[in-house]
Image (cartoon, helix red, strand yellow):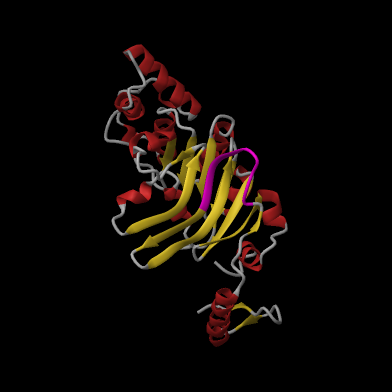
């Protein structure tokens, strides 16, 4: 067992002290004031979330979270594994509906639409709020058909030429057109990992979303592919609102304008990315960012 940092003396202690220190830290977390600090709300919000609670059976996974997502901003959600950030992300387009034991309470709005309203159809909602997953998941179809699939089922193209325009435009926005324009009939699964992820981004863009959710989109990619996707996120921000979950704090610092730190289901701190990383206001945020916990 490795050593850990003693908060009183700022020196490393041995394995027995490590167990005691972690137990003391967890007890402190229980007593900590859990009210969110920082700027939860923005003037030009694309999505608004108020008093959101999520349960998996009896487990309280998300606890009274309120936050806005600004128009044409990149919001990064960070925190230790199991803190609830991916669960909260999936609330934003009702992906948690697919989990039988999951119950979501509170209010989440896309502009004026209450996305959990009784009359809301989740199919067009998930076109408006698209999702890019942790591992690239292209369909077992051609590159062209991967991108064309969504516009076809949503009736976004009245002719083959219109569909062609959507496919080409989406691949260009995803930074993939120059690499695949001469092999659109080849399987999407034959692309490299980074190319597959950009193909999935093109697929999401093709249905004309308003918000793009990204759940650790670079965790399975090498550094070069990661840099390409990060550059793409910066370009997409001009047209879309983006929420990204990432374990890579350097990535959050590079791509986002605002950062939200989650811990044990609570939203601990929200603020401009520069401020959160250089001057965190909550002890739990500081401990995570400095590597003491998480």
Residue most extreme to the bottom: 16
251 sits left or right of 205 in the view? right
Q: Quadrant of the C terminus?
A: bottom right
Classify 207 as above or below 275: above
| Segment colored magenta | 40-50
**205 or 34: nearer the eye?**
34
* Residue at (44% x, 26% y) in the render: 171
**145 or 266: nearer the eye?**
266
Q: Residue 53 location, x and y as percent?
A: 45, 58
Q: Quadrant of residue 209?
A: top left
Classify 233 as above or below 107: above
Residue most extreme to the front: 118
192 sits left or right of 72 in the view? left
Q: How many marks?
A: 0
173 sits left or right of 156 in the view? right
* Residue at (59% x, 67% y) in the render: 34
Q: Residue 182 location, x and y as percent?
A: 38, 20
Q: Quadrant of residue 293?
A: bottom right
* Residue at (33% x, 30% y) in the render: 146
**80 or 232: nearer the eye?**
80
Specify whether residue 172 is in view.
yes
Classify 15 as above or below 104: below
* Residue at (49% x, 42% y) in the render: 109
Specify whether residue 219 is in view.
no
Q: Residue 125 location, x and y as percent?
A: 39, 37
Residue 184 included in the magenta stretch of the image: no
């Amino acid at each position: 067992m490795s050593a850990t940092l003693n908060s009183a003396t700022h020196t490393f202690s041995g394995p027995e002290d490590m167990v005691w220190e972690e137990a003391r830290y967890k007890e402190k977390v229980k007593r900590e004031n859990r009210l969110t600090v920082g700027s939860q709300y923005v003037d030009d919000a694309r999505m608004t979330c108020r008093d959101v609670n999520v349960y998996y059976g009896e487990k309280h996974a998300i606890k009274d979270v309120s936050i806005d997502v600004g128009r044409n901003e990149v919001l990064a959600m960070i925190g230790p594994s199991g803190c609830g950030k991916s669960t909260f992300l999936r609330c934003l387009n009702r992906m948690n509906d697919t989990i039988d034991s999951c119950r979501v309470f509170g209010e989440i709005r896309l502009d004026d639409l209450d996305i959990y309203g009784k009359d809301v159809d989740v199919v067009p909602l998930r076109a408006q709020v698209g999702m890019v997953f942790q591992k690239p998941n292209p369909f077992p179809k051609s590159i062209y058909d991967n991108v064309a699939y969504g516009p076809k089922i949503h009736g976004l193209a009245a002719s083959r030429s219109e569909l062609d325009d959507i496919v080409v435009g989406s691949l260009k926005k995803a930074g993939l057109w120059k690499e695949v324009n001469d092999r659109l009939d080849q399987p999407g699964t034959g692309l490299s990992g980074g190319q597959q992820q950009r193909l999935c981004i093109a697929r999401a863009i093709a249905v004309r979303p308003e918000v793009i959710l990204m759940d650790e989109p670079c965790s399975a990619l090498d550094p070069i592919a990661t840099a390409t996707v990060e550059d793409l996120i910066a370009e997409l921000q001009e047209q879309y609102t983006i929420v990204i979950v990432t374990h890579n704090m350097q990535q959050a610092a590079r791509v986002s304008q605002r950062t939200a730190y989650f811990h044990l289901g609570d939203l601990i701190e929200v603020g401009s990315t520069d401020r959160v990383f250089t001057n965190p206001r909550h002890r739990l945020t500081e401990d995570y960012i400095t590597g003491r916990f998480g």
